[in-house]
Image (tube, rainbow, N blue to C red):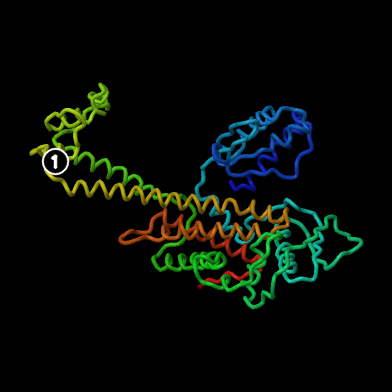
Amino acid sequence: MTPVELSRTVLRAVRRAVDDGELSVAVPARVVVERPRPGGCGDYSTNVALQLAGPAGRPPRHVAELLSRRLSDSPGIAGVEVTGPGFLNLTLADDDPGALAREILARGGGYGASDVLAGQRIEIRIPYEVRAEVVADSLRRILATQGAQAHVVHGETAESSAAHVVNLRPVPAPCDPAVLGRDASRWALLLPAAHDRPRIDDEHLAQREGNPLFRVRYAHARTKALTRNAAALGFTAEPGDVRDQASAAGDASSATGALTRNAAALGFTAEPGDVRDQASAAGDAPSTTGALRATGAPSTTGAPSATPALADAPSAPDAPSTPGDVRDHDTAIDSGVAVRARANAAAALHTALSAYPQALTLAATHHAPDRLARQLVVVADALLGFQHTVLPQGEEKPSAAHRARLALAEAAGAVLAGGLSLLGIDAPEHL
């Protein structure tokens, strides 16, 4: 479930509560959901109960509890918890890991479109200035994705047939941006917020990590390269679970096996019982002297030096060196770290893609194309951190996890291409 879909689910719960007479308020046009702040819980949080409490004449927590009961039975929601004065914390059901990639690939450039502004006629008024022209052109496209009909006019007009009038007055460009070329100049004018002064310099042309435009376009080109390379290896994208279940299970069993072999080499086997060290429980373990006595080192008075005593301690003749087992254990640990790293990279990309529809809606409702540009940077950075997990490495064979990762990468490419198109910027397949 995407943030936009979750917002609509919460809005439907509010509407049902009003229709059933449990709340006496005007149903809001939209509900904002966001990632929980530090100390929060669940996947998303909303303060809609606090917003409705005043008009409803009810305590915020009472409104939150009322909505919580309705949301707990909604499809796609695994749990609802009320925290603080009345925040709703929502945990999503993870019943279809490939749903997001599948939706994006099906909708393509239409992913993120909604009917939030359906039926609205908007007139965008701008001065005769290059940055205002570029911002208005992108805003008109973004508004269309949310169902609005927008057109651009220059200067002030006494009357307007539009229901909504937007006066755009962004800080003008300090110089002619045409020297950067079409794509870089548009990015330079769109990335800063309207009240910030844009920079017109060669940094927007640099093909290096410090240039956000380069990272966005390079990330899109990488998704195309991944698709080509996967085809050469004989597999294609298939939305699904990006986790490699076999690897995760194998890492766990490998680590367990290594521990068992090491224990056998040291002359003992598993025996169920109290896992606490009894000497430690008696209070001897924290004592350095007690620890040294346990190794066979002579006891000393005062504060002993741990290093010499341990150096003098005789080695156990029955404890042979087991470099192979140690390597097995280290390999298992390294593999476990790699599995977690892949999972974290996939989660970051999934989060960035899930947040795209909300960023697009906010760009439209706040008349701020810069919100879309910044979200594209977030998606690009997440993709660049994820891309190395997509293709098999070494002797690996393509698995269901590789196909699912490729689908997620291709979904990111579709989002990047669609977002750049709304900004009027090309998304090259080779860079």
Q: Quadrant of residue 62?
A: top right
Give the labeled residue for mark 1. 311
Count of marks overlaid on the render: 1
Instruction: Let me know if residue 382 appears in the view.
Output: yes
Q: Residue at x 62, y 76 (%)?
A: 180
Q: Secondary structure at mark 1?
A: helix
Q: Is residue 332 above or below residue 208?
A: above
Quadrant for residue 45, please give it: top right
Q: Position of residue 84 (x, y in %)?
A: 61, 31
Asked if 192 appears above or below 39 in the picture, the reply is below
Q: Residue furthest bottom?
A: 179
Q: Residue at x 15, y 39 (%)?
A: 308
- Tell whether 398 sits left or right of 109: left
Q: Height in image: 138 above or below 349? A: below
Decide if residue 218 is on the left or right side of residue 48. Answer: left
Looking at this view, name the residue that lies furthest to the top.
282
